[in-house]
Amino acid sequence: MIARRLGKSVALIERGKHPRVVIGESSTPLTNLLLEELSDRYDLPSVRPLSKWGTWQREHPEVACGLKRGFTFYHHNLEKEKDVILSEGRDAAGVEGPASPLSDRTQQLLVAASPHDEISDTHWYRADFDHFLIREAQKLCVDYLDETALAAFTESDSEVLLEGTRHGQPLRIAAKFVVDASGPRGFLHRALGLSERELPGFPPTQALYSHFENVRRIDELQTAAGEPYPVDDAAVHHVFDGGWIWVLRFNNGITSAGVAATDEFAEKYSFGDAAGSWRRILERIPALEAQFASARAIRPFARIPRLAFRSAEIAGRRWALLPSAAGFVDPLLSTGFPLTLLGVSRLAEIFANDWGSPSLAPSLADYAAQTDADLLATSRLIAALYANMSNFPAFVSLSLLYFAAVSYSETARRLGKPQLASSFLLRDHPEFGPVSGGLLERAQKPLKEAESQALTDEILAAIEPVNVAGLGDPARRNWYPVDPDDLLRSASKLNATEAEVIALLQRCGFQLR
Ligand SMILES: Cc1cc2nc3c(=O)[nH]c(=O)nc-3n(C[C@H](O)[C@H](O)[C@H](O)COP(=O)(O)OP(=O)(O)OC[C@H]3O[C@@H](n4cnc5c(N)ncnc54)[C@H](O)[C@@H]3O)c2cc1C
């Protein structure tokens, strides 16, 4: 759609047929801000309502989605939790064990992403969402060719040629440029025989997932007691040694759930027998077992035997991989969409500004370098989280590096000061970038208790210059609502006046005294 707005003629080639189900569903404040910015910059008013729950519900109720008020984490001990709960709080030796993470705040992290539903984030029910985008693209005269099997890509001095078949007929498309949006290990990666590179320090991981109906809400199992938002209306993460489970609820009765875990965990729970493996994991987590007691998978389980991916090359003379085709780390923290939209935004600027220049090579080399650097920064963060999934205090502290960076970035951009946060996870920020990088390097292995306490203190010092959300305040005890006073107190960190912050809060629907 952006390329059409820039005056190009566009063919959109799809192997399958919409509507179709794909994974990757949960959006974040940065995702939605980028969607808004792209809609405004490239005059795509039909897409803009999908950047917030309120406008989405009013303008496109036919496109299913879920309400995401925040990031909910529960920490579980799969070896003990079930035994302790069955024996009413005591283990076999009679020693008192942990309470259910649903009631024990030390085993929770709740980070609100929005103050109320109207401007809240969403989970995208991709069958509907992507189909909607396809129809909108067609309205802008994008040539949509579905059920197309591409077989070859050849490049000459003046163009590229894509060859394949559609409905049994040969198909040839000559183009000036190809953007590959076909996902990890996708079309160009294979057609050009590109190699894979390692994500340094990232463990080998895999995933299992499906869509379910009749999944009960957590707040039906546990009475809410002042949480910063309804805990189910969120991306719900259940974290344990070696992996984690996501639960994302849509407004059409369907819930997406799955598990991402190390190879070691996958072997222990026999991921090869997907449905059985899912059942065996849930049996170790009483809260999830209760939530899924009457649930039914409405699709066969899918398994991804290797989640992480990094392409050795990202762009050529007449082609570029979107970030989602160039690499992937893990669904944890929903980084896929913002990375992809940052890539869309960078490519759009290249098309808008450099198309007529003798060579796109310098801009595309920069695009490739930025895309790879974003991927590596994401990988370093998530590797540290994986290494410390059994040490929840360390996991929580490490995750504050993410929440501090993204909340600062979002606020800076919403204040019209994007130069304060020009890179993903603030990796290029002069102070925060190198310090957070160093801390994450140290946490690429499981931390002992004393190490993790020292690291926590250093993390709190590191986030201070960009902490605009009261993160790490011990009085909050791991529950972080959106509190306008945090932002007002942090105005100077954003080079903003109190009046600018008040105006921003009012735009976000806060009634200020
Ligand atoms: C388990 C899992 C969970 C995730 N969860 C999240 C999340 O919660 N939040 C988040 O932000 N990100 C998440 N991601 C990442 C997210 O899925 C991607 O960032 C996102 O889907 C990228 O969208 P896309 O349209 O570029 O690619 P995809 O969604 O991968 O779509 C690729 C499209 O290309 C088509 N295609 C493939 N090969 C060809 C071919 N040869 N020719 C023509 N067409 C082809 C496919 O049919 C498909 O329609 C997750 C990823 C995984 C693996």
Image (tube, helix red, strand yellow):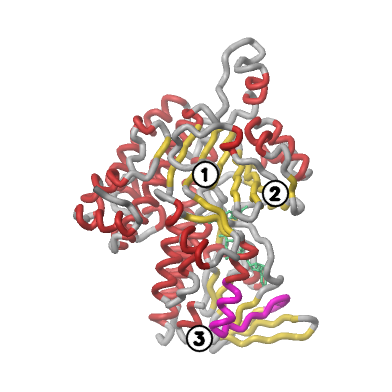
Give the residue type that dot 3 points to.
Lys
Q: Is residue 284 left or right of residue 230?
A: right
Please name the amino acid that badge 2 sits on. Answer: Phe
Vertical arrangement, residue 486 with respect to residue 40, above or below: above
Q: Do we see residue 24 in this rendering?
A: yes
Q: Which residue is nearer to you in this view: 457 or 139?
A: 139
| 128 or 313: nearer the viewer | 128
Which stretch appears magenta? Answer: 133-152
Say the numbered circle drawn on residue 383: 1
**Marks 2 and 3: which is nearer the front?**
2
Question: Which mark is in front, 1 or 2?
Answer: 2
Query: Which residue is denoted by mark 3 in the rendering?
Result: 8
Q: Secondary structure at mark 3?
A: loop
Q: Which residue lies under the disc numbered 2? A: 212
- Please tell me whether residue 482 is drawn above or below residue 227 in the rendered image: below
Residues at circles 2 and 3 in contact by the CB criterion of under 8 Å: no
Q: CA distance from mark 2 to mark 3?
A: 41 Å
Dot 2: element? strand
- Between 14 and 248, which is closer to the camera in this rendering? 248
Q: Choose the circle earlier in sequence order: 2 or 3.
A: 3
Residue 33: image location, x then y, percent: 41, 61
Inspect the image, locate mark 1, and give the three-letter code of the amino acid beneath it: Ala
Picture coordinates of residue 83 (x, y %)?
67, 21
Residue 59, given in percent of the width and then of the height, sits at 51, 67
